[in-house]
Image (cartoon, grey):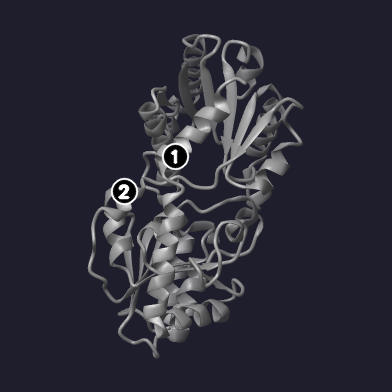
Amino acid sequence: MKIRYITFGSHFQNSQASNAAYNRMSLTCSGLNLHGINAEICEIYSVLFGKSLIHYFGHFICIFKTISILLSLKKDDVVIVYSENPYSFLFKFLHKRARLFAELHEYPAYLIHKSISLKAVRLSKSFEKNLIYFEGLIACSYELKRYYQNYTNRKCKYLVMPLLIDFKKFTCNSFEKEDYIGYCGDFGNNKDGVPALIEAFSIISNKHNNYKLILAGGTNDTSAINFISSLIHRFKLEDRVVLTGVLNHNQMPEFLGKASVLALARPDNLQAKGGFPSKVAEYLASGRPVVLTKVGELDKYLTDNVNVFFSDSDKSEDFADCLDRVLSNYPTAIKVGESGREIAESFDFYRQAEIINRFIQRE
């Protein structure tokens, strides 16, 4: 049996969010290969397709690539379509050629983002309509599973898998702690609440004046970057908040391992309800105290003051109180961080790949 991940978007672009998607697929394939399954990623998009006339010609290349992948497979081989795919109409005609699975980790974009083109809405709804031809669906949350059940066939089976991590990669080195609160991720669309985190830090900055806030990541949204810069200026934190830009994934263990605290002030919205931030596993694996807003399904796996610290809400004041509680009682907080590492180990990619393999195998 061969397994082929088909992904449309270019996951090699300079983006923390796209890197997270590619890392998840890569870890899954690595784990499946270790279990003796031939698995690989098939990316059908090229960044060149966005250039003038090549854009339209590129669609034909993508269609040709998708058909070629499907025709190269035997009947018991598996295709996993990662995220929404604009060429889902092909699966309607070729679904008997191979076994089709989908892996989805967010609500469709037209539900999350207010400004989205009608063409994108149509493509998204077309993908949902064609989910009826899929044999199984992998989602990161029960919320998403319930949503997409409205579009799948009655025989479709489901697997909820919130996180994957190369656990050894984040625990093989021991880094000396430095005085900073760390965050990594996407600054755009207020997905992770970066403005709220900056404001929360401003509230405690005088009390904990030896700490910095270091933000790793970025966005292509110029207005989001400008707003973050304006917040830093307004709170007079130019010397206390550091923007590193997007870090290579190989740099993440050191960045997370040196932090005193790792933070994610994700707002309580529809995106948070359906998604599950992959960075949480890496945060926990570092063994450092982790401060999160209690959104989505995080509390199904984590417990406040046991293996994580939950802010009472996504308000800056509440998040600041939680950060203050951690920094003011750091010896206790470290013990909580060490317990969090044990949770992260359960999401190691080798273990999770075994679960995916069992899920895909025919009964």
Between 154 and 300, which is closer to the camera in this rendering? 300
Q: Is residue 188 above or below residue 10?
A: below
Q: In this view, does 147 lie above or below 61?
A: below
**Residue placed at 62% from the left, 58% from the top?**
296
Amino acid of disc 1: Arg
Is residue 221 shown to the viewer in this render? Answer: no
Give the SS element for disc 1. helix
**Residue placed at 52% from the left, 82% from the top?**
321
**Residue placed at 66% from the left, 47% from the top?**
142
Residue 65, position as x, y percentages in the image: 46, 17
**Mark 1 Cα-neighbour bin, 10 Å: few <14, some 14–19, many ≥20:** some
Q: Is residue 196 above or below residue 57?
A: below
Residue 204, position as x, y percentages in the image: 44, 85
Residue 167, position as x, y percentages in the image: 36, 49
Query: Residue 351, labelled with which disc?
Result: 1
80 horizontally vs 12: left or right: right
292 horizontally vs 236: left or right: right
Amino acid of disc 2: Lys
Residue hosting label 2: 168
Give the SS element for disc 2. helix
Is residue 324 shown to the viewer in this render? Answer: yes
**Mark 2 Cα-neighbour bin, 10 Å: few <14, some 14–19, many ≥20:** few
Residue 123, position as x, y percentages in the image: 64, 32
Q: Alpha-carbon distance for marks 1 and 2?
A: 13 Å
Which numbered disc, 1 or 2, marks the residue that appears first in the sequence?
2
The image quadrant of residue 108 is top right
Q: Is residue 150 above or below residue 284?
A: above
Between 215 and 253, which is closer to the camera in this rendering? 253
